[in-house]
Amino acid sequence: MKATVYVTIKQNVLDPQGSAVQGALHSMGFDEVGKVRIGKYLELDLNTTDRAEAEARLKAMCEKLLANTVIEDYRFELEG
Amino acid sequence: MKATVYVTIKQNVLDPQGSAVQGALHSMGFDEVGKVRIGKYLELDLNTTDRAEAEARLKAMCEKLLANTVIEDYRFELEG
């Protein structure tokens, strides 16, 4: 089973990396760019066939390691 | 218009960050986790209404700044 996890910074938390990219894009002439937010995108192969269990396990992985839930949100998709 | 950009490491390029996360998940008891690949996920607000132009401009942003096309692939989606 393949899992895709998206970890994004919460809306009310500052994103200095996003601001830096926005500034760089502006200085390169891409003036149409407004707010930029940068997150993480993870692809995991899971050796399991039980979808419900995989969801529960993925939730635990996100809470414990993949996302810092104080400042980040996460969501995931399961395929296969 | 809202753009979502996914930047991923090419399949044949080593991903040490992914390997580290895989090792950490294993040591936490998540033994079902196979390969882990980590990429970037960017959300950009674009002050433009011309979809075709936005696509061309986004492609330029990815090639010039957002992705290192020697070792990374990118894809993007436009909404609104």
Image: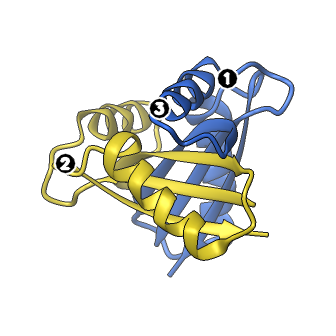
Chain colours: A yellow, B blue
Residue B17 vertical position relative to residue B56 in the rendered view, above or below:
above
SS of the residue under disc 3: loop
Q: Is residue A66 above or below residue A20?
A: below
Numbered disc in front, either 3 or 1: 1
Instruction: Read off the chain for label 1.
Output: B
Pointer 1 local density, CA inside 10 Å: few below 14, some 14–19, many at least 20: some
**Where residue A38 sits: x, y (%)?**
39, 45
Instruction: Say which amino acid is labelled 1.
Output: Asp
Residue at 16% across / 44% down in the picture?
A: A14
What is the spatial separation of the Cα atoms under label 3 and label 2, in whole angstroms? 30 Å
Kindly identify which residue carries mark 3: A28
Cβ–Cβ under 8 Å for marks 3 and 2: no
Name which quarter of the figure residue B38 lies in: top right
Which disc, if any, is residue B15?
Answer: 1
Give above or below for B15 relative to A44.
above
Residue A55 visible (yes or no) = yes
Q: Is residue A33 left or right of residue A53?
A: left
**Quick one: SS at disc 2?**
loop
Chain at numbered mark 3: A
Instruction: Measuring from the top left, give residue A26's x and y in whole percent.
Output: 38, 38
Q: Say whether residue A70 is left or right of residue B32.
A: left
